[in-house]
Amino acid sequence: MKVLVAVKRVVDYNVKVRVKADNSGVDLANVKMSMNPFCEIAVEEAVRLKEKGVATEIVVVSIGPSTAQEQLRTALALGADRAILVESAEDLTSLAVAKLLKAVVDKEQPSLVILGKQAIDSDNNQTGQMLAALSGYGQGTFASKVEVSGDSVAVTREIDGGAQTVSLKLPAIITTDLRLNEPRYASLPNIMKAKKKPLEVLTPDALGVSTASTNKTLKVEAPAARSAGIKVKSVAELVEKLKNEAKVI
Amino acid sequence: MTILVIAEHDNKVLAPATLNTVAAAAKIGGDIHVLVAGQGAGAVAEAAAKIAGVAKVLVADNAAYAHQLPENVAPLVAELGAGYSHIVAAATSNGKNILPRVAAQLDVDQISEIISVESADTFKRPIYAGNAIATVQSTAAVKVITVRATGFDPVAAEGGSAAVEAVAAAHDAGKSSFVGEELAKSDRPELTAAKIVVSGGRGMQNGDNFKHLYALADKLGAAVGASRAAVDAGFVPNDMQVGQTGKIVAPQLYIAVGISGAIQHLAGMKDSKVIVAINKDEEAPIFQVADYGLVADLFEAVPELEKLV
């Protein structure tokens, strides 16, 4: 079966982002960019499904600027077979991305689509669920275990206070949570091989998708700064402060 | 303006997060209706009718809604919600699972995890794991919103007397089925809901040493978390991770033990009301955000703290 994996290019999780002085957004000039950590887990899961003989082809797709080709090449080096970039320099909302992915799903007809549960830049946690709604597929969000059998997939999901298992008819949408797997690193020979794998570039126009949005970001501010408090000298002093000053215990 | 709030529940008990969600709805202004979609959730509907400020409770009772499967609940919410000005749910695992599906069905963008209401169409929400706060305006006819519970003080659970109305709509998409559920049996509270969180980092040295933190947590009624460094080192499982790629917590008291304070970790806990840091390295960045810092060997300080609290 064919597996489609969506990946997003985002600021590296180790970077401390700064808000621009004009409050128009976050300053991304000269900042290290990487594949969204949850998307890495999505790629890894697809590769494991292929290694188990469940998946036969892995197509990786990204919606974003032309530089997102770097993240697509990374996914190819990790084991994806071919890549699609839907190129857009705009700041797209989750709904717009879901509509573009729906167009790719219509074209590719995968049995399984795996996405990260959220991107660590916009923190929306929407795209997978929206793609499922638009496609009319079942969704297994925040997955910690995925087992395909026949024409269905059992997904164990991380929920508040525990885990839930649902069975979904294929085709289905899965979004990954942290415990699903530990992504591998790409080996040098695979990075070299990935350069020769096919990478197709499409546009929203070519897919016939409007990316209009009902959301508008008015401004982006730095959060209220937290200042350092005091150093206490002993555990006894700490307990006294927590009881009588902060009144939290 | 009428707002539809989606009740968070397990068919037996109304979850407290619903009270924070109603509080956010009250800030938006207008009549508040609460939808209880479930199976045999009569007690939940009764509890919802008592919430202060709620005008009406809608009850959709059907086997298809018993486990909050989004394939079935989202079409119900989209159908009922189309006539409302706002559809609001708590940013719990259910809310996050169901609401984007509703938004897509209504062809509107969702606003996730708001922490404040600026006006009926403008909201603040954290992005980049809380390292920036975006002010977002929605022009959608129906505004679909999830609410971060820690951003809103709960409304009173008692005092209202809303009318309860049954909704006949039944949606069973037939795409998914519930197999089973395993809820943690731990007596400790869930990380994201706990009032006190005790977290350990690389300084714990190994997984066995986390017993000191468990002992302290049990005395305080606290949840136990960990930094990514402690998880990556294999001390504790991944689901304990507090940070940008783990859980985001904002308890009344956060005690960071042997945690240096990497950006990744701070992103997950810096909205805590009071932060305590215990670390033997007085240069550790965690002290820059801590209200109370104690430079000490954690293996002496933590057992002593456990005795004194």
Image: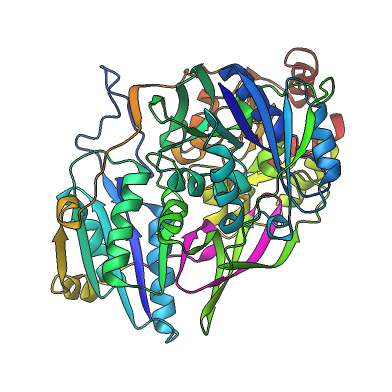
- Taking depth in this image into account, of B132 and A152 the one nearest to the observer is A152
Asked whether residue A61 appears in the rendered view, the answer is yes
Looking at the rendered image, the quarter that the N terminus of chain B falls into is: top right
Q: With respect to residue B42, does B181 lie above or below?
A: below
Q: With respect to residue A85, does B35 lie above or below?
A: above
| x and y percentages locating residue B292 in the rendered image | 64, 21
A34 is within the stretch colored magenta = no
In magenta, the rendered stretch is A159-184
Asked whether residue A12 appears in the rendered view, the answer is no
| x and y percentages locating residue A97 in the rendered image | 32, 49
Q: Is B52 left, or right, of A139 in this rendering?
A: right
| Residue drawn where x is 80% and y is 53% of the image | B186
- Taking depth in this image into account, of B217 and A96 the one nearest to the observer is A96
- Taking depth in this image into account, of B102 and A58 the one nearest to the observer is B102
Q: With respect to residue B32, does A116 lie above or below?
A: below
Q: Is A248 left, or right, of B118 in this rendering?
A: right
| Residue drawn where x is 37% and y is 45% of the image | A95
